[in-house]
Image (spheres, rainbow, N blue to C red):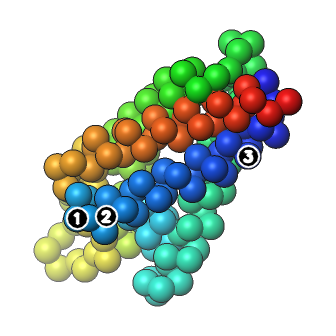
Amino acid sequence: MSVWGTVVGGLVGTFVLTTILRTASELRLTRMDLPFLLGTAVTSDRGQAKAIGYVLHFVAGVLFSLAYAIGFAALDRSGWLLGAAFGLIHGLFAGSALVNILLPIVHPRMGTPMSSIASTALLEPPGFMMLNYGRSTPVLSLASHIVYGAIVGWFASAVR
């Protein structure tokens, strides 16, 4: 297993994950835009939020790939199938806890189920597994995270 391979896999995997989700958004299969969600946590300027969000998303992709590397090292093996399993866990965690529970708490421009009618939120809260962004969003998010994990696992085992 190679940590550098895992990091490169994280970059490639994030690119592929982002492309899948961006394409799904353009095809109106989901209204989710992860880079925009991340960027609007930093700025209310919608244009800047997109650019900042992409940078933050790629940084997160590398950080998650390092977490995968720790898992690969603990199990003393890596590969695309193990990476895909990690991606499934990652996707379930991201959809159920990270984006649904933690993001609305810390995001200054996102509404919550407790937001009052008088408040104006820039973003709708995602809801469980991000269902507020479309019925196909959970499937698309999980599938793209599985692909991300498979790419990270493949790079981790292929690059020495």
CA gap between label 3 and label 1 equals: 30 Å
CA gap between label 1 and label 2 equals: 5 Å
Disc on res. 28: 1
Q: Amino acid at mark 3?
A: Val
User: Residue 73, percent across and down?
Assistant: 75, 20
Q: Amino acid at mark 1?
A: Arg
- What secondary structure is marked by label 1? loop
Instruction: Tell me the crowding category of disc 1: few under 14, some 14 to 19, or many 20 or more residues within 10 angstroms, Cα based.
Output: few
Find residue 117 and report its image quarter: bottom left
Disc on res. 5: none
Q: How many numbered marks have been drawn onto this rendered protein structure?
A: 3
Residue at 74% x, 43% y: name it. Answer: 7
Find residue 106 and report its image quarter: bottom left
From the viewer's side, name the closer residue of 108 and 92: 92
- What secondary structure is marked by label 2? helix
Check the image and report above or below for 52 versus 12.
below
Q: Earlier in the sequence, mark 3 or mark 1?
A: 3
Q: Earlier in the sequence, mark 3 or mark 2?
A: 3
* Circles 1 and 2: CB atoms closer than 8 Å: yes
Quarter of the image with the C terminus is top right
Residue at 53% x, 41% y: name it. Answer: 148
Check the image and name the residue furthest to the front.
Answer: 158
User: Residue 63, percent across and down?
Assistant: 67, 46
The residue that disc 2 covers is 25
Q: Is residue 152 left or right of residue 39?
A: right
CA gap between label 3 and label 2 equals: 26 Å
The residue that disc 3 covers is 8
Residue 102 makes an appearance in the image: yes
Q: Amino acid at mark 2?
A: Ser
* Circles 3 and 1: CB atoms closer than 8 Å: no
Check the image and report above or below for 125 versus 51.
above
Q: Is residue 87 left or right of residue 71?
A: left
